Image (cartoon, helix red, strand yellow):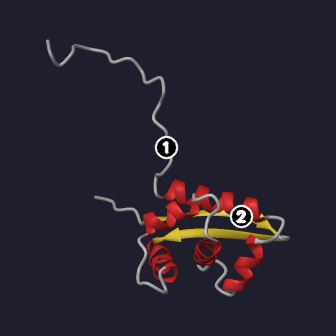
Amino acid sequence: MSLVAFYDEEPLEACGEKLTLAIDFSTIDVIEHIAGEQGGIVQFPNVVAMLYADPPPLSVSGKVLWALLRRHHEDVSLDQAAGLMFSEHGNRVAQAMLTLINRAMNLGKAKDKNPPRRRGASKTS
């Protein structure tokens, strides 16, 4: 058996910087803890749901962005991550975050509206 580690990244260019957002299990752990600082751990699926709220809570979005930046940009502070969110590149940053999370967690895959026809004998015959 060959196990593959849970890891994914998404490149992002914003504010004249080439950034790399990265997600692994440690990132999820950090997100759950910092998103729930006042009331304990917040489960990651709940954090993802908050990111899709209209509008998403700014504090949650900023904490998720900061956590996604940590692996490759450990010197970025939480306030700098928030500054990136509030820059003219905010929409691109949000899109990169959601793209990475959706891909890494296998979320958002829509069912094929026109699935291929079944072939062969039916199970009832």
Distance Cα–Cα, label 1 vs label 2: 21 Å
Is 72 drawn above or below residue 3 in the view shown? below
Q: Residue at x 78, y 72 (%)?
A: 86
State the image quarter where residue 11 is shown: bottom right
Report helix, strand or loop for mark 2: helix
- In this view, the residue in front, 121 or 45, is 45
Is 107 drawn above or below residue 70 in the view shown? above
Q: Amino acid at mark 2?
A: Val
> What crowding class fits label 2: few (fewer than 14 Cα within 10 Å), some (14-19), or many (20 or more)?
many
Residue 98 bears which disc, if any? none
State the image quarter where residue 66 is shown: bottom right
Image label count: 2
> What crowding class fits label 1: few (fewer than 14 Cα within 10 Å), some (14-19), or many (20 or more)?
few
N-term-proximal mark, 1 vs 2: 2
Instruction: Give the residue number, with chain letter if any, for mark 1.
Output: 109
Is residue 76 shown to the viewer in this render? no
Q: Residue at x 67, y 80 (%)?
A: 73
Residue 93 bears which disc, if any? 2
Are the residues tagged 1 and 2 within 8 Å (C-beta)?
no
Q: Amino acid at mark 1?
A: Lys
Is 72 drawn above or below residue 93 in the view shown? below
Relative to 117, is 99 on the left or the right?
A: right
Q: Quadrant of the N terminus?
A: bottom left
State the image quarter where residue 51 is shown: bottom right
Image coordinates for residue 94, horizontal then vertical, percent = 68, 62
Query: Looking at the image, which residue sits at the far left?
Result: 125
Image coordinates for residue 62, horizontal then vertical, percent = 64, 75
Image coordinates for residue 8, horizontal then vertical, percent = 54, 63
Relative to 105, is 69 on the left or the right?
A: right
Q: Residue at x 77, y 78 (%)?
A: 83
Q: Residue at x 62, y 63 (%)?
A: 97
Report helix, strand or loop for mark 1: loop
